[in-house]
Image (cartoon, rainbow, N blue to C red):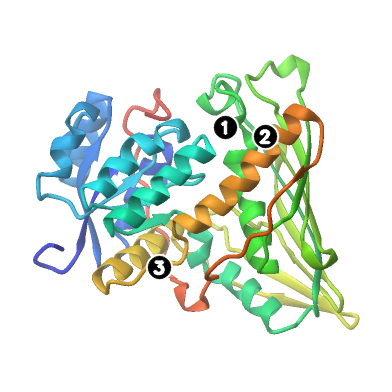
Amino acid sequence: MPNSNGQIRYAVVGGGWISQGAFMPGVGQTSNSVMTAIVTGDPEKARGLGELYGIKGYDYDEYDALLTSGEIDAVYVATPNFRHREFAEPALKAGIHVLLEKPMAASLADAEAIEAAARASGAKLMVAYRLHCEPGTLAIVEAIRAGEIGTPRFFTATFSQMVKPGNHRALNGYWAGPVPDMGTYPINAVRNFFEAEPIRVMALASRVPERDLGCDDTVSVILTFPEGRSASFTVSYSAESIDRLHVVGSEGIIEAYPAFGFGEGTSIDFRLIGDGETQERKAPVVDHFGGETDYFSDCILNDRQPEPDGEEGVLDMIVLDAIDRSIATGAPQDLAPRSRTRRIDTDQARALPLADVPEFVNTDVPMD
């Protein structure tokens, strides 16, 4: 049940950068959501974040007790990918709703187990695809659906950043590396722009020797879709930051730069090019995390299933798993034909103002 103000009560699981720098400030931008607990293995974070937000701190060992305490309605899970199932599955089985950071897990089997737990329990599961509630992204979806570039034929994207060798994402192989971390964005974007699922995957990976990362640091992927459509993207942990996409249709082009980012001064504007003209389509700077939380809480309060649900997350995980196999074997991977039962609804858009971010607590430990 929500609190006396009709707000969904969240526990934040994992006190790393994404929680502290994005989700926790964003909750305060909503009117239907509130935080009541922080779950972390770091006592300093538990104490500091508890004082900052007026919430209770729990150790990971106390998680099961929290789930049955009656103090929360939902959890936001933002641990490293390999720990997602550890916290999402028991929450769902306890009837607690779950907002789960992407990608869903560090294996397809774990993602399918999380989705199965949601289906069995009736608790709501939403994968935190923040762009499904971001006005600029939804305007791109709307323009494509309206036929403003004709039939979309191919998609390209580039997404990179310079990740420090000591970062946990650089130390734990493929499932912590750039493809699950960053490649999920172009995969999810093109699946929704094309409103189709890929049928073949090919990937090539490389490493910069002097960087000495614990994963392939640059990966290029080609996806084949039905009806002769294709997509390609490159992601990297060893290059200057870039964040760009193109959707090229039979009668026009959409380009967005930035395409996947968030934060101060960042709006997902795009340009629509066709008939020799370029139209600038502007979007507001919004709080992505407040928006997705507001949408999820609204789904809980009104007993509606969120659109970016477990099925949406698993469909991306199927592609991520195929990319992993293609890198390992050097061969294309064929995928069974699939369809999605629902797609993004443009009514999901939220335009909450960007939150101020407080000083981080214990930034020496970037992620739980």
Residue situated in front as seen by the camera: 319 or 244: 319
Which residue is labeled 1 in the image?
175
Crowding at mark 3 (Cα within 10 Å: few <14, some 14-19, many 20+): many
Q: Is residue 86 left or right of residue 201?
A: left
Q: Which picture quadrant has residue 240?
A: top right
Query: In the image, residue 161 lies at what x, y percent?
Result: 66, 37
Residue situated in front as seen by the camera: 246 or 325: 325
**Labelled pair 1, 2 in contact (Cβ < 8 Å):** yes
Q: Earlier in the sequence, mark 1 or mark 2?
A: 1
Distance Cα–Cα, label 3 vs label 1: 32 Å
Which residue is labeled 3 in the image?
352
Q: Residue furthest right?
A: 276
Indicate whether 253 appears above or below 328.
below
Q: Nearer the viewer, mark 3 or mark 1?
A: 1
All told, the count of numbered labels is: 3
Image quarter where the C terminus lies is top left
Q: Amino acid at mark 1?
A: Trp
Distance Cα–Cα, label 1 vs label 2: 8 Å
The disc placed on residue 324 is 2
Residue at 45% over, 54% down: 128
Indicate whether 356 appears above or below 111.
below
Q: Is residue 94 left or right of residue 230?
A: left
